[in-house]
Amino acid sequence: MAIEAGRRAGSVHRADSLGTGAPRRAGRGRPTRAGEFWWWIFMRVSGLILLVLAVGHVLIMHVFGGGVDRVNFGFVALRWQSPFWRTWDWLMLSLALVHGINGLRVITLDYVRRPGVRIATNWFFATAGALAFGLGSIVVFTFDPCKWPGTVGIHC
Amino acid sequence: MAQRRTASRTGGFGSLYRGREGQWSWLAHRVTGVGIILFLFAHVVDTALVGWGPSAYNRVVSVYKNPPIRLLELVLVGMVIYHALNGVRIMVIDFWPKANDWNRQLVYGTVLLFGLGMIPITYFIVKPIFVKYF
């Protein structure tokens, strides 16, 4: 009966997410249960997409077609002539950073026991990720080989 | 102590993660994941140098062409392939709970696929070292 009322009010489940029956402490933020559910979904969905993007990237750039020996400025300039590869690389950058940094957050839950240190660690990685995301996005979308005339195969 | 070891060997604390295949694949997933994200930070910076022109970018990618770095490259590619294959195994168990009963077999299947895949990958990554230097 109480549960039904709580469902209607939309509060009882969240207030007692651990099922301990303890009252919710004042000042505590929204329990993370719903958040963790969406992170769980995100890890799987992004994992599936990265299965194509990251494994494809590794096979194309490092294994087949000559590997890293052929990679240089001209190679990237030609490759990024195509919006397809720019989109591929940017999507991979975004998903891999969020997937990886959330993975690190899950790991700190196991090994960094003091909440203050854990929060600081997570903020450190999140900030590093945001910087990497910003830098990578700017380069992927603003790269223009015509700033360096004479690149083979590029007509400006 | 002996009792604890036996329990962990037979999966007495729960079959999916405690001891044996489940635990090792979990550990490998974690280690490869951390390895990949740490490399990713460096890789974003080195790739971003393409926005600073040919001399900057060509100089930084020449690092990847050193023979010892190629072995690290092989390790990195292996980490990505393992993490991807093992991620698929995790999702199979998540979305089809009956697969849990076959976890050991799935782990060995993952390792087998990984090993088979790494044969041609190792060949292609290591071959240039011999072509160039011997």
Image (cartoon, coloured by chain):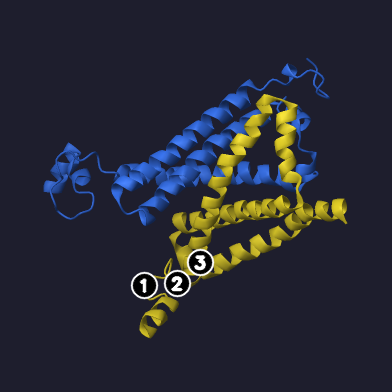
* Residue at the far top in the pictured view: A156
Q: CA distance from mark 1 to mark 3?
A: 15 Å
Reading the image, the residue beneath label 2 is: B19
| Chain letter, colour blue in render | A
Crowding near the residue tagged with mark 3, few <14, some 14–19, many ≥20 C-alpha atoms within 10 Å: some
Q: Secondary structure at mark 2?
A: loop
- The chain whose colour is yellow is B
- Indicate the position of residue A107 as horizontal and vertical percent values: 42, 52
The structure residue drawn at horizontal position 36% and vertical position 72%, both measured from the top left corner, is B13
> In the image, what residue type sits under mark 3?
Trp
Seen as rendered, the residue at the extreme bottom is: B2
Q: Residues within 10 Å of mark 1 (few under 14, many from 20)?
A: few
Label 3 chain ID: B
x, y (%) of residue A6? Answer: 16, 42
- Residue of label 1: B13
Q: Describe the element under mark 3 as helix, strand or loop.
A: helix
Same chain, marks 1 and 2? yes
Q: Which mark is residue B24?
A: 3
* Above or below B79: residue B1: below
Q: Are marks 1 and 3 on the same chain?
A: yes
Q: Give amino acid for label 2.
A: Gly
Q: Is residue B29 left or right of residue B49?
A: left
Let me know if residue A88 appears in the view.
Answer: no
**Sequence-first tag of 3 and 2:** 2
